[in-house]
């Protein structure tokens, strides 16, 4: 049982004061980001935004807009700048409270690019060559730039910079979190315990939301259903969901139907059961189900759509929210980067306090076990 203050007048590690300074501040850190590379879609919502918004009370939440990552596919400055503001409005409109989390734009914390370089010097080529996302994007015709190839290293820097423990994502990003872990292990084993190992958090029910064509819904693949489309565009997208040509009265397997797999994300349970029965027994008319899905989507996001419009009508306030978030994020990033610089030898003047504080914290939280792993 701790005493109310540090009786030793130094650091005893046991009293309430020391415990609160070194331990209680250590809340669970949850981090995830979204690229401002196109319109927010249903896959982004279920894979990342909804879990992040639901996690606001669970720990220290780091939500950000990864504009540097988006540069691997967007080379239009207006589109990138406006996309960044849109993504910020999307997130807040859907329920993210910037007062309850750290919410910022990736490039506003330039420290992340320095950490990326440091990590890249330890990242084996083979680790990146094995990344499916890179191979998929190349196969879809996206130009194979160095940035696209080293995308996972920047992502590792994002996670490690903030010592994030939990990363809510869709399944497509699982391998990238594993890459970040491998890089962190290599760094820790080479330079001493520094980084927490991040873990992916994936909701199996929505791990890969299918797009119009049944493949993973992605901004990069042009197969999305945007959440904030206008009524006409929304209807056009939903009507374009690819289905087979089986007659209405034929029994069908709902789980193999792309339309059903999107419909089930939004339909109320009783209606979903009715539609499921129609599939199994015959009578499921794709056209009618699509029109019903349009209405459900429109209603589901009505309130968020109105909030988003209000937010985007006042870009100055939105920018101010992001500026404040970047200040908070940068303060955190500087602590990690100071330590990293010292660890690798980029600091010839040792920042004693920074390192000592980190070591003490580890000692008393007994976190060291989390860092030591064999080299990948
Ligand atoms: P995109 O692939 O559309 O460019 P991002 O790379 O910006 O999307 O991903 C943002 C977040 O949304 C990530 O956590 C990613 O895993 C999640 N996500 C993207 N598409 C899907 C999907 N189809 N199903 C589930 N989660 C997804």
Image: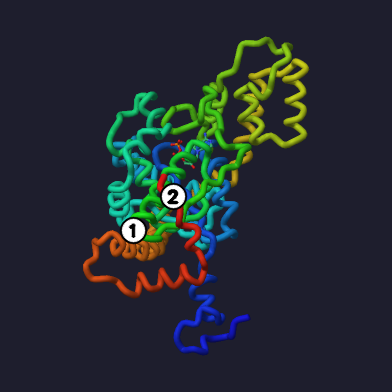
Q: Is mark 2 within 8 Å of ligand 1?
A: no
Mark 1 nearby-residue class (10 Å; few <14, some 14–19, many ≥20) = some
Residue annotated with mark 2: 374
User: Residue 52, relative to residue 203: is it above or below?
Assistant: below
Residue 104, picture quadrant:
bottom left
Residue at 61% x, 38% y is 204
Determine whether the residue tagged by mark 1 lies in a helix, strand or loop.
Answer: helix
Quarter of the N terminus within the rendering: bottom right
Any mark on residue 151, and which?
none
Residue at 46% x, 70% y is 361
Residue annotated with mark 1: 191
Q: Nearer the viewer, residue 375 or 13?
A: 375
Residue 320 visible in the current orientation: no
Determine whether the residue tagged by mark 2 lies in a helix, strand or loop.
Answer: loop
Q: Nearer the viewer, residue 23 or 59?
A: 23
Relative side of 17 to 64, left or right? right
Measured from the top left, where is residue 16 in percent x and y? 56, 80
Residue at 48% x, 49% y is 32
Is mark 1 in CB contact (under 8 Å) with mark 2?
A: no
Q: How is the image coloured?
A: rainbow
Residue at 43% x, 32% y is 132
Given the current orientation, which residue lies at the most extreme front position? Answer: 374
Measured from the top left, where is residue 183 in percent x and y? 38, 48
Residue 334 visible in the current orientation: yes
Measured from the top left, where is residue 114 in percent x and y? 28, 54
Given the current orientation, which residue lies at the most extreme left position? Answer: 348
Q: Nearer the viewer, residue 330 or 74?
A: 330
For the residues marked 1 and 2, what is the alpha-carbon distance in whole angstroms?
A: 14 Å
Residue 135, picture quadrant:
top left
């Amino acid at each position: 049982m701790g005493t109310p203050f540090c009786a030793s007048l130094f650091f005893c590690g046991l009293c309430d004061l020391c415990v609160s300074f070194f331990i209680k501040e250590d809340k669970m850190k949850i981090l995830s980001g979204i690229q401002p590379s196109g319109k927010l879609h249903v896959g982004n919502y279920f894979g990342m935004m909804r879990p992040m918004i639901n996690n606001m009370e669970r720990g220290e939440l780091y939500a950000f807009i990864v504009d540097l990552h988006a540069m691997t596919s967007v080379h239009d400055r207006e589109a990138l700048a406006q996309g960044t503001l849109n993504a910020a409005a999307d997130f807040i409109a859907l329920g993210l409270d910037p007062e309850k989390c750290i919410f910022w734009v990736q490039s506003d914390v330039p420290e992340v690019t320095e950490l990326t370089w440091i990590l890249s010097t330890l990242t084996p080529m083979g680790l990146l060559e094995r990344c499916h996302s890179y191979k998929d994007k190349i196969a879809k015709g996206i130009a194979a730039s160095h940035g696209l190839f080293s995308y996972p290293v920047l992502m590792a820097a994002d996670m490690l910079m903030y010592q994030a423990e939990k990363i809510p994502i869709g399944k497509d990003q699982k391998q990238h979190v594993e890459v970040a872990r491998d890089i962190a292990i290599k760094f820790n084993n080479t330079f001493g315990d520094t980084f927490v190992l991040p873990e992916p958090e994936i909701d199996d029910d929505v791990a890969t939301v299918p797009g119009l064509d049944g493949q993973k819904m992605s901004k990069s693949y042009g197969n999305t259903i945007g959440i904030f489309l206008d009524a006409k565009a929304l209807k056009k997208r939903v009507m374009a969901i690819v289905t087979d040509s089986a007659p209405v009265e034929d029994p069908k397997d709902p789980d193999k139907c792309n339309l059903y797999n999107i419909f089930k994300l939004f339909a109320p349970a009783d209606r979903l059961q009715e539609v499921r029965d129609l599939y199994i027994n015959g009578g499921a008319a794709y056209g009618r189900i699509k029109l019903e899905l349009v209405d459900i989507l429109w209603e589901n996001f009505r309130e968020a759509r109105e909030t988003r419009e209000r937010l985007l009508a006042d870009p100055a306030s939105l920018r101010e929210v992001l500026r404040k978030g970047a200040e908070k994020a940068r303060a955190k990033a500087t602590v990690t980067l100071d330590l990293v610089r010292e660890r690798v030898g980029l600091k010839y003047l040792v920042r004693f306090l920074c390192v000592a504080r980190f070591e003490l914290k580890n000692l008393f939280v007994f976190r060291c076990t989390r860092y030591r792993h064999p080299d990948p």
